[in-house]
Amino acid sequence: MSVEILEHPVVIRARRIVVTLVLLVLLGLVMRPVEAPAWQVVKEGQAELNLDELEGALGQGLVVGVLGGFRTIMADFLWIRMNTIWQRRDRVKLDAMIRLVTTLDPRPEFFWINSSRMVAYDVPNWRIQEEGGYDAVSDARQMELNVEQAEQAFHLLDRAREFHPDNPKLVLETGQIYLNRLKDYSNAADWFLKASEMPNAPYYAARIHAQLLRQQGKDREAYAFLKQLYLDLPDDPYAQKGTVMERIRNLEDELKVPYLMRFQANPLAPGVIPQPSAFQIE
């Protein structure tokens, strides 16, 4: 190879790059025995430090401004990190991480709904287990813990509705907690009714409201509600008008509604006797 080629600027630059890469590789191999234990020491305290500092900064609105367009990516990353915290059943860090994730990116309903479920369903179980388990903890104490955690979940869902005021899923989630965790049929019925009146609400919300009325012994209210519901529902298979009609008929049997006074879906149709405007159920 001629001297001119060896002294060409491109060759000289390539040679320098190769030498630099070789030196970096060698340095990495030499430093690896020292790097591993040192990095482990840093990692042991880094998670707690980051959480505390990031949470404090969020309170001042600093992180949101600094991250800018990276907020969504950071929120997704922290949500994955939260899975580890959930597996460890660390209540304090779980609460902090939920605040971080929902503050960084409040747009995904997934964050709000699943966070509220962790708080309302998982955390009470953890606390009961910490106090000795279901056999050792009294029913009164179990309910106290359920109510305490449900209130935190309700607060979380209240915040969620500030960002998603027209999302019926968040309203339904509140109703589900009242129903499934607290067995509070009255409040659950109110929230399912509220959800059923929202745009794009699932059809089942209204049917569950009627069932919850019956659960409270309010059969007459349920009967009146179902009759109006049937008239309001569209002719859509998902609306399950047949199911609604079946429940109307069951209630008429239980309430002993006279045959001529029973609900007619189309009272003005030929050959159908119009319904009286009012009647007394026996």
Image (cartoon, rainbow, N blue to C red):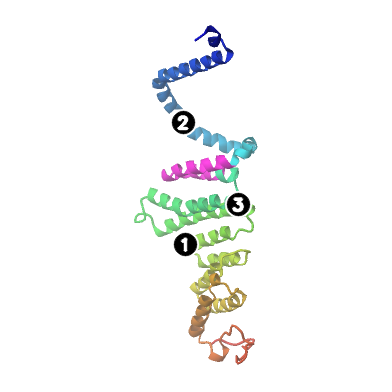
Q: Are marks 2 and 3 in contact (CB under 8 Å)?
A: no
What is the chief secondary structure element of the magenta stretch?
helix
Chain-order first, disc 2 or disc 3: 2
User: Residue 280 at what x, y percent from top left?
Assistant: 58, 87
| Front one among 165 and 137 | 165
Q: Tag 2's secondary structure?
A: helix
Q: Is label 3 in a helix, a strand or a loop?
A: helix
Stretch in magenta: 72-100
Question: 128 or 123, which lies in front?
Answer: 123
Disc number placed over residue 64 in the picture, else none: none
Q: Residues within 10 Å of mark 2 (few under 14, many from 20)?
A: few
Q: Is residue 56 left or right of residue 30?
A: right
Question: For the residue carrying disc 1, how many other residues have a C-alpha within 10 Å: few (<14), some (14-19), or many (20+)?
Answer: few
Residue drawn at 50 percent across, 16 percent down: 20
Q: How many marks are shown on the rendered structure?
A: 3
Q: Which residue is mark 1?
A: 180
Packing grade of label 3 (10 A; few <14, some 14-19, many >=20) is some
Q: Amino acid at mark 1?
A: Asn
Q: Position of residue 105 (x, y in %)?
A: 59, 45
Residue 58 place in picture, x, y as percent: 60, 39
**Residue tagged by mark 3?**
159
The kind of residue on which mark 2 rests is Gly
Disc assigned to residue 45? 2
Query: Mark 3: which amino acid?
Result: Arg
